[in-house]
Amino acid sequence: MEALYHQSNKHVHEVQSQMGRLESCDKQSVHLVENEIQARIDQIFSNLERLEILSSKEPPTKRQNAKLRVDQLKYDVQHLQTALRNFQHRRYAREQQEKEREELMTRSYTTNGTQKKILDVANMLGLSNTVMRLIEKRAFQDKAIMISGMVVTCVVMFLVFKYLT
């Protein structure tokens, strides 16, 4: 039992060091390291099952201590399993975010301006492009007339104010 316990404990420490390595490895090798860590954890779990059986066969004076050591080892392995799952979840979320970011970057956006809507409505009504250009030219002329009228009105108001007061 002691040899199996020390071997399992050694595997736990190896997995802990591999978890540190997992954070710094590149994207291509991360799956290999994850699989290796998961295989080690599975091996430790199978060792723990055998250790539980062996600890129950210990003499009554050593049984409590043996069960305590096995339970501590089991807790450590469960902690490592949870840490691996958390890392995989964070990696998956990060990959999803990168994928969504790439989709947003490649998406082409169109303007939803009023001019496009007016052209669409005009095309539905059967107005030709020539008529639409005439309407746009008239709108520009109307705007110029309005601005010049406003300027003339302001000048007249200024002159009236200056010379009549």
Image (cartoon, rainbow, N blue to C red):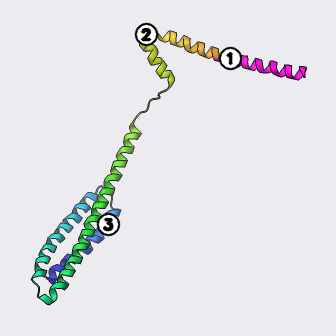
Q: Nearer the viewer, residue 134 or 58?
A: 58
Q: Which residue is mark 3?
A: 21
Q: Position of residue 4 (x, y in %)?
A: 15, 79
Quarter of the figure with residue 62 = bottom left
Please give the range of residues in magenta: 143-165
Residue ID at (43%, 10%)? 126
Q: Secondary structure at mark 1?
A: helix
Q: Position of residue 128 (x, y in %)?
A: 46, 10
Residue 22 in view of the camera: yes
Horizontally, is 85 left or right of 136 in the view?
left
Q: Position of residue 98 (x, y in %)?
A: 37, 48
Badge 2 density bin: few <14, some 14–19, many ≥20, Cα 10 Å: few
Quarter of the figure with residue 8 = bottom left
Picture disc at residue 126: 2
Q: Quadrant of the N terminus?
A: bottom left
Q: Is residue 164 above or below residue 71?
A: above
Quarter of the figure with residue 10 = bottom left
Q: Three-letter amino acid code at disc 3?
A: Arg
Picture disc at residue 146: 1
Residue ID at (31%, 60%)? 87
Q: Nearer the viewer, residue 150 or 103?
A: 150
Badge 1 density bin: few <14, some 14–19, many ≥20, Cα 10 Å: few
Observer-side mark, 3 or 1, equals 1
Mark found first going from the N terminus, 1 or 2: 2
Badge 3 density bin: few <14, some 14–19, many ≥20, Cα 10 Å: few
